[in-house]
Amino acid sequence: MPTATCRCGETIVDDRWEKLDEIIEKHRAKQGALIPILHEAQELFGCLSEDVQLKVAHALGISPAEVYGVATFYSFFTLKPRGKHKIAVCLGTACYVRGASELVRALKEELGVEVNGTTKDGRFTLEVVRCLGACGLAPVMMIGDNVYGRVKPEKIPEILKEYQ
Amino acid sequence: MEFYRSHVLVCGGTPCVLEGCKAVRDALISEVRRAGLAGEVKVVETGCLGPCDMGPIVVVYPEGITYARVGVKDVPVIVEEHLLKGRAVDRLVLGTGAKEKGVVSYERPPYFELQQRIVLRNCGMIDPDSIDEYIARDGYRALAKCLTEMTPGEVIDAVKESGLLGRGGAAFPTGVKWSFTARATANQKYVVCNADEGEPGTFKDRLILEGDPHSIIEGMAIAGYAVGADKGFIYIRGEYVLSIERLERAIQKAREYGLLGEDILGSGFDFDIEVRKGAGAYVCGEETALIESMEGDRGEPRLKPPYPGTCGLWGKPTVVNNVETLANVPPIILNGPKWFRGFGTERCPGTKVFTLTGDVNNKGLIEVPMGITLRQVIYEIGGGIPGGRAFKIAQTGGTSGGCLPKELLDVPMDYFSLPEAGSALGSGALLIVDDSHCIVDIARCFMKFFKHESCGKCVPCREGTDRLYEIVDKVAQGNGRLEDLDLALELSRVMQVASLCGLGQAAPLSLMTILQYFGDEFREHIVGKTCPAGTCGF
Ligand SMILES: Cc1cc2nc3c(=O)[nH]c(=O)nc-3n(C[C@H](O)[C@H](O)[C@H](O)COP(=O)(O)O)c2cc1C
Ligand code: FES
C-alpha cells in the first residue's frame, strides 16, 4: 500500500487509498465510469497524482495513458497539488469588458504569484477560467466554492483575509 | 395546498444567492412571523426572475410589485409598510418611470413589458423544489397527454408543426431530429439533455434548471416517449452546483410521484434520468464531444455523419437537445403547434431566452419573441448604455458569434436574419460593449478563448486559433502589419470550411466581423501606432 510521509518524517499509512477503492467499486459497473471516479478521487486527494492515475487505470483495466489523457484534457482536473484555496478569476468576455484583467493584476500583486502559481505558504492558487455563467455580476471570481460578483480590485485584501 | 393572502417571492437564482438573497429570505420569514402574519403571508424561494444585476429581487403577489436590491435592513420596512399596511415601499420598487413626478405607478416596467414567457413560464413564479407547485401550473399535464392520448408519431408531428428549432445554437428543427431517432431500430435509445453551457456570456440554461427543473424532466420524458428511449442523461457543467442539487431533488420527487421510473402513469412507458457532471471543457458542449465525454474519454468531437440521432451514446441512437429546447416542449404539446406559431416569426416561431451582459443598464435573463430587434433589446429592455457612454458593438451568439456595429441595430434577432448580417444567434448570449473599449483588445480576448479551448484534434482549428491570436496580439502590442490582416481573413475562411466541428468553424467569426466593421481601428493601431481608446499601451 502506498504510504505518505508527514512533515515530521514519520511514515504513516494513508487510509485514503481504501476510500479510493470504495469509489472505484461504486462506479465501476456503470458505463463511462472514469470521469465520475476522477472527480471523486481529486476531491479525496486534492489532485490526480501519478499514483492515483495508475491505481485507477489498473482497477478499470485500461491503460494509464488513457487515464492521463482524460486527466489532462479537462480543466477541472489537476495533476499538481493546488493551494488550500483555489482562486479562479473569470476572463470570459462579459467579465473582461467589466475589468477582469485589473482583478488578475491586483491578485498577482497581492499574492506575489503568476497565473497558475501557488503562494509559498500554500494558501492560494491563482487561476483564470472561462465564463462562470454569472456574467450579470461581472467581474466574477470564485474562491473555492464561493462566488464573488462585481469585485473591485481594492477589495481584494479584505476578501482574502477570510481565507486563512 | 394551503392558501395565503400574499406570496412573497425571493429570487434564489445563482446571481441573487451571491448578492445575499438567503439572508433576505431568512429575514423575511422571521419578520413575517414576528408581525404575526405567518398564516397569511408565504415566503417562497424561487428561481431567477431575470434582472440579475439588481438582485436580490423580491416580488410581492397578488400586487406583482417587484423590489430590487433588497438588503436585510430593508426587510422590516417591506413587512411593516407593504405586507401589514398595504403600501408599497417606493424607494425599492423596480422601474417606476413616473416616480420623479411624485406619482408612483406600478405598471410593469418595460423590462418586463416586452417579454413573453414560455420557457421561463415558471421561473421566479414557483418554488423549484416543489413538484406540487409545478403540477399546479399544468406541470406534467403534457406528459400525461402524450402517454394517454397521443401516439409517439403524433408527438413528433406536433413538434415538427410547431416549427421549434433547437436552441443550443445550431437551430436544427427539433421534430425532424426526433424523427431520425424514432425511425432508427435499436434495442436501446437515449435522450441527452445538453446542459454543458460553456458559451461565454450565456447563463440561461443554468437559470432555467435552477428555476424550473421539472420542465426539463417533463420535456425529456416526452422526447423519450416520442423516440422510444427509456433512459435519459443530463450532462451538466460541474460548476453549476445549485442546478445540480435542484435537479437531483426534482428527479427524486418525480420518481416518488411515479412520473419517472417504470410504467409511468400506468401507460407501460418506462423512463428514468441520470445526471452526469462535466469536467470543464468548452468543446464538450458540442454534441459528439459531449458523447465522448459521457463515455469517459477525452471530449474530442467525432466526424459527422453518422449523427448522434442514429449512432450516438455507446453507438445507440441518441437525441441530444439543449435545455431551452426541452423546456419549450411541454407547452407546445399542451397548447398545440398553432399556439406556438403565434409567437415570433414565420420562419422562427416561439421565443428566445437571451442573457444580456456587458455595458448595459439592465443585465440579466430575458425572454422575448423571435424577431425582436437588437435596438429594442438594448434600449427598451436593457435600458441603454450606462454612464452616458455610446454604444460601440453588440456581440450576438456569444464568443462564437459576430460583432455588429450601430448601423445594424435594427436587425431582427432570429436564426436567419442574424447570419445574413454576418453574425449568429447561437445560444442567445448578448454582449454589449461601449465606446470606452478598444476593439483590438476585445478581439484579442475572443481569440485567446479559442486558442485555449481548441481541443487540438484537427489542424485548421488547432493551428488557426493560435495564429489568429498571434496576429491580433501583435497588433495590440504595436507590432502589427497590414498584410497580416489579409492573412487573418484567408486563414479564417479556411477554418470555417475545414475545421472538424463547430468550434473551429465559428472561432474566426467575431474577428471577421470586427475586421469588416471596425477595420479602421485596426489600421490605426498598425499604421498610426495609436490606440484610440487608449487601452493598448504603446
Ligand atoms: C463548440 C460547441 C459548443 C457547444 N456548446 C453547446 C452548449 O453548451 N449547449 C448546447 O445545448 N449546445 C451546444 N452546442 C450545440 C450542440 O452541438 C448541439 O447542436 C445541441 O446541443 C443540439 O441541441 P438542440 O437541437 O436542442 O439545439 C455546441 C456546439 C459547438 C460546436
Ligand atoms: S463572463 Fe464572467 S461569468 Fe460570464
Image (cartoon, helix red, strand yellow):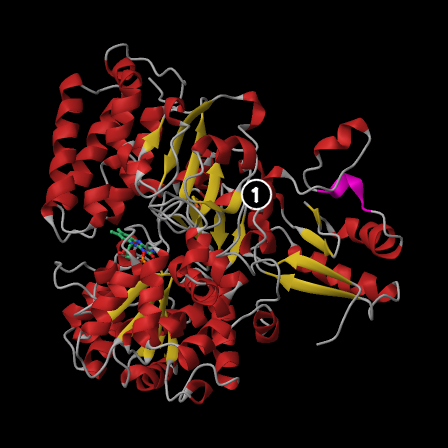
Q: Whole-percent x and y of residue B384? A: 54, 29
Q: Whole-percent x and y of residue A19? A: 38, 83
* Part of the protein shown in magenta: B88-93
Quadrant of residue B221 within the rendered picture: bottom left
Q: Which residue is mark 1?
A: A157
Q: Residue furthest top?
A: B528
Q: Whole-percent x and y of residue A15? A: 39, 83
- Per the image, label 1 sits on a secondary structure element best described as helix
Quadrant placement of the C terminus of chain B: top left
- Mark 1: give few (<14), some (14-19) or many (20+) Cα within 10 Å: few
Identified at 42% across, 37% down, the residue is B431
Identified at 47% across, 34% down, the residue is A99
Q: Whole-percent x and y of residue B46? A: 61, 61
Identified at 23% across, 30% down, the residue is B512
The reply to whether residue A1 is visible in this rendering is: no
Which of the four quarters of the rendered structure image does ligand 2 lie in?
top left
